[in-house]
Image (cartoon, rainbow, N blue to C red):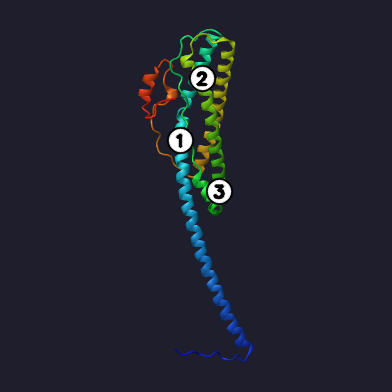
């Protein structure tokens, strides 16, 4: 292989020409490197966005199902308030055989946490990133409120097997549990509405809701055996 020796530079003009060629080469190399990096970032952002949107769509589907049960929850709260009001400290009449409970489904945030920890969420549009932050904050609130709600309904469900008159202490305890259930239902309505609205602003479309029989929608005089049969869950009811 023949190696050409560098030519001596005889003038400032030649020097500037050589320097210009070197600078141009460096700029082209840097530009190419930045283009490749930008393509990689765009690909990483698109992949993270697809993953997060799929997670959000699943979560919002569960919340939409929760919203479809709100009329049953409100009706059951009113029914129990009337029942306890009639009984006062005495016996429940008629004694309920089924109280039921609102459904509860855990929301997931692993994909958003992964996108945030890896820095990929910072590649999103600022408005989009803000909407995702808001949405996942609402999902965390919903998860916490649903957990508290189940505690209240667990106490109310003891009315299904209450043996006799309530008495002052039991009446107060049930009244407090009912008020807790009412508050949690109210708060969850607000959070669910904000979450679904934020999802809409992100362009998330939800599949059509399924018409499922839920525990809280069954009548008060349903027997436990019939309720378990109609709900058809493989793990039964608590």
Any part of residue 188 in sight? no
Mark 2 or 1 closer to N-term? 1
Picture coordinates of residue 178 (x, y %)? 55, 20
Residue 112, above or below 238: below
Q: Dot 3 corresponds to which residue?
A: 129
Q: CA distance from mark 1 to mark 3?
A: 22 Å
Does dot 3 land on a helix, a strand or a loop?
helix
> Which residue matches tag 2?
156
Give the total of numbered labels.
3
Residue 9 locus on image (x, y percent): 60, 90
Q: Do the residues bearing badges 2 and 3 touch, measured as CB atoms within 8 Å?
A: no
Q: Nearer the viewer, residue 170 or 111?
A: 170
- Residue farthest toward the top in the current orientation of the protein: 90
Q: Callout 2: helix, strand or loop?
A: helix
| For residue 179, side relative to residue 56 (left or right) | right
Residue 10 locus on image (x, y percent): 61, 92
> Which quadrant would the N terminus be assigned to in this image?
bottom left
Mark 2 burial class by Cα count in 10 Å: few <14, some 14-19, many 20+: many
Residue 7 falls in image quadrant: bottom right
Query: In the drawing, what numbered circle is on residue 62?
Result: 1
Residue 181 is tagged as none
Query: Closer to the N terminus: mark 1 or mark 3?
Result: 1
Q: CA distance from mark 2 to mark 3?
A: 41 Å
Say what secondary structure mark 1 lies in. helix
Q: CA distance from mark 2 to mark 1?
A: 24 Å
Q: Is residue 14 visible?
A: yes
Q: Name the residue: 45% across, 45% down.
A: 54
Q: For the residues labelled 2 and 1, say whether their Cβ atoms are less than 8 Å apart.
A: no
Q: Earlier in the sequence, mark 2 or mark 3?
A: 3
């Amino acid at each position: 292989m023949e190696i050409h020796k560098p030519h001596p530079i005889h003038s400032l003009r030649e020097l500037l020409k050589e320097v210009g060629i070197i600078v141009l080469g460096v700029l082209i190399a840097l530009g190419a490197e930045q283009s490749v990096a930008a393509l990689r970032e765009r690909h990483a952002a698109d992949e993270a966005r697809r993953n997060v949107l799929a997670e959000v769509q699943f979560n919002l589907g569960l919340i939409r199902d929760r919203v479809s049960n709100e009329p049953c929850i409100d009706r059951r709260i009113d029914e129990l308030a009337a029942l306890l009001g009639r009984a006062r400290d005495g016996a429940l009449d008629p004694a309920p055989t089924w109280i039921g409970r609102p459904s509860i489904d855990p929301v997931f945030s692993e994909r958003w946490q992964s996108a945030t920890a890896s820095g990929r969420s910072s590649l999103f549009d600022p408005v989009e990133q803000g909407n995702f932050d808001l949405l996942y904050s609402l999902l965390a609130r919903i998860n916490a409120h649903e957990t508290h709600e189940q505690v209240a309904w667990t106490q109310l469900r003891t009315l299904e097997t209450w043996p006799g008159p309530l008495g002052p202490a039991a009446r107060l305890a049930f009244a407090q549990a009912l008020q807790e259930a009412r508050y949690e239902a109210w708060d969850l309505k607000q959070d669910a509405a904000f979450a679904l609205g934020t999802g809409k602003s992100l362009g998330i479309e939800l599949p059509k809701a399924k018409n499922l029989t839920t525990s809280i929608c069954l009548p008060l005089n349903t027997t436990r055996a019939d309720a378990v049969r109609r709900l058809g869950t493989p793990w039964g009811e608590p």
